[in-house]
Amino acid sequence: MRRLLVAVAALAVAVTAVPAARADAPRYPVGGLPEAVANFFTSPDAVAGANDWNCEPSAGHTEPVILVHATTINLGTNWTRISPTLANEGHCVFAFNYGMGPLSFLGRVGGLTDVASSAEELDAFVDEVLAATGAEKVDLVGHSQGGMMPNHYLKRLGGADTVDDFVALAPTNHGTTQNGLVTIGENLGLLGLVNGFFDLVGLQGLKDQEAGSDFQEALFADGDTVPGVDYTVIATRLDTVVTPYTNSFLDGENVTNIELQDQCPDSPVGHTGVAFDGPTIQNILNALGPDDPDFQPECADYGPDF
């Protein structure tokens, strides 16, 4: 009888402890592409898991994570899977919209204005996050332009002092030829005309991401990286937006370049798909956590092929 009473008491303690633990660590719903499409229209400036301004960094995750979205979308669209996943793992997650211009469709289409100005928006947002959380540094996770633009913040705005880890997903580092369109336009003498149009309608962000652009040449003229920041670049061989896809990679002693098909040869994931890709997310968690150089993700749960 005594053993039975002890067992019942232990079970009661365990049962009552579970709700308390869950209350301290809320589980956010992890979305995917359907939620991303819906959020473009209905929730462009909010996504599950992000922007809890009362979040306190834990001993295991001392740096808040700031998510930096891609060109022509917004935080609500880009981060439906990654934001709640990181938050559920105990990270304080924050996200913002940047690069909004005249063609931004009421704050839904971001990353349009010049990259240097967008980096200044990142600078201001980092200050807000540091002030709210009391942290000394942040980690950055960016997609496409969001994986390239922070380089200007790090190299030209003093951001290296406030960033620990920078994880870039299919970034437009070193620009893109857009499957040769930039090269064709240059050879035909039309690129200047196109770029003039971009300037006229507030699409300098597109011009700045062209391979060989003045912005790209100036940004990386003194090297790809800065000391004090750990860089992880995750790229897909099947990228049809950043072309050649190897332009995503950075050169430096503090860089880990990951080609997803080297880890998972059957991966079909494309440029957009990396934001919804299981192996990509596993690599992000490793980069922000144990940072195991021999890490191998489970090759399953792939993102879409576009």
Image: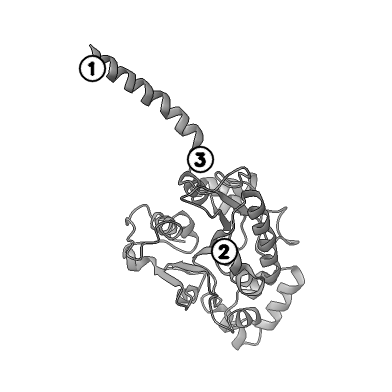
Q: Specify few, some or many for label 3: CA neighbours under 10 Å numbering under 14, 14-19, or 20 or more.
A: some
Q: Which mark is residue 163?
A: 2
The one nearer the camera, 168 or 129, is 129
Q: Which mark is residue 239?
A: none
255 left or right of 129 in image: left
Q: What is the three-letter code of the residue carrying label 1?
A: Arg
Q: Is residue 266 above or below residue 28?
A: below
Name the image quarter holding residue 38.
Answer: top right
Q: What is the three-letter code of the residue carrying label 3?
A: Tyr
Label 1, label 3: how far apart the Cα atoms are: 39 Å
Sequence order check: which comes first, mark 2 or mark 1? 1
SS at badge 2? strand
- Asked which colour scheme the image uses, the reply is one colour
Name the image quarter holding residue 66.
Answer: bottom right
Q: What is the three-letter code of the residue carrying label 2?
A: Val
The one nearer the camera, 90 or 299, is 90
Q: Is residue 279 visible?
A: yes
Sequence order check: which comes first, mark 2 or mark 3? 3
SS at badge 1? helix
Question: Who's the residue at 45% across and 28% down the image?
Answer: 19
From the top left corner, tell me how far across and down residue 104 is, in percent.
70, 58
Label 2, label 1: how far apart the Cα atoms are: 55 Å
SS at badge 3? loop
Sequence order check: which comes first, mark 1 or mark 3? 1
Q: Specify few, some or many for label 2: CA neighbours under 10 Å numbering under 14, 14-19, or 20 or more.
A: many
147 left or right of 114 in image: left
Question: Who's the residue at 62% across and 42% down the image?
Answer: 54
Location of the N terminus (image quadrant): top left
Q: Which residue is mark 3?
A: 28
Label 2, label 3: how far apart the Cα atoms are: 26 Å
Q: Which mark is residue 3?
A: 1
